[in-house]
Amino acid sequence: MITKERKIELVKQYGSNDKDTGKAEVQIAILTERINDITKHLEGQKKDFNSARGLMKLVGQRKRLLHHLHDTDITAYRKILEKLELRK
């Protein structure tokens, strides 16, 4: 689970100010952090189907946000892919 301090750190890093949680880049970064945590959990708990379903929902949400960012601001899209080391 992502800690409150880690979430604040991500908002500061990817947002324009400390309260900018609505920005697509911030939301993508937070979702990526949660996806990585759940992926680590599922490596040891292969039969946890509820968490696997939640993971698929998060991946889909991140995909939609990335698609939106690609359509609106291609430079920010490329920058976020590079920073988070996502492949596209």
Image (cartoon, rainbow, N blue to C red):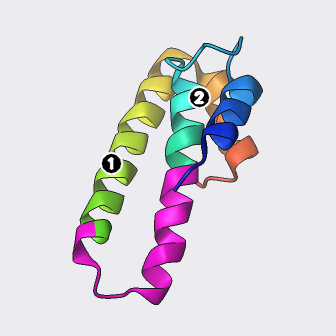
**Is 14 positioned to the left or the right of 24 in the image?**
right
Instruction: From this view, report whether residue 15 is shown above or below residue 29.
Output: above
Main SS type for the magenta part?
Answer: helix
Q: Position of residue 46 (x, y in %)?
A: 36, 88
Residue at which label 2 appears: 26
46 drawn magenta: yes
Who is closer to the viewer here, 11 or 1?
A: 1
Find residue 49 and report its image quarter.
bottom left
> In whole angstroms, how far apart are the C-alphas of marks 1 and 2?
16 Å
Instruction: Please report the residue visible at 43 percent of the width from the left and 78 percent of the height from the top.
Output: 42
Q: Which mark is residue 60?
A: 1
Q: Position of residue 80 (x, y in %)?
A: 67, 36
Who is closer to the viewer here, 33 or 61?
A: 33
Q: Label 2 sits on what residue type? A: Val
Which stretch did the figure color magenta? 33-50
**First in sequence: mark 1 vs mark 2:** 2
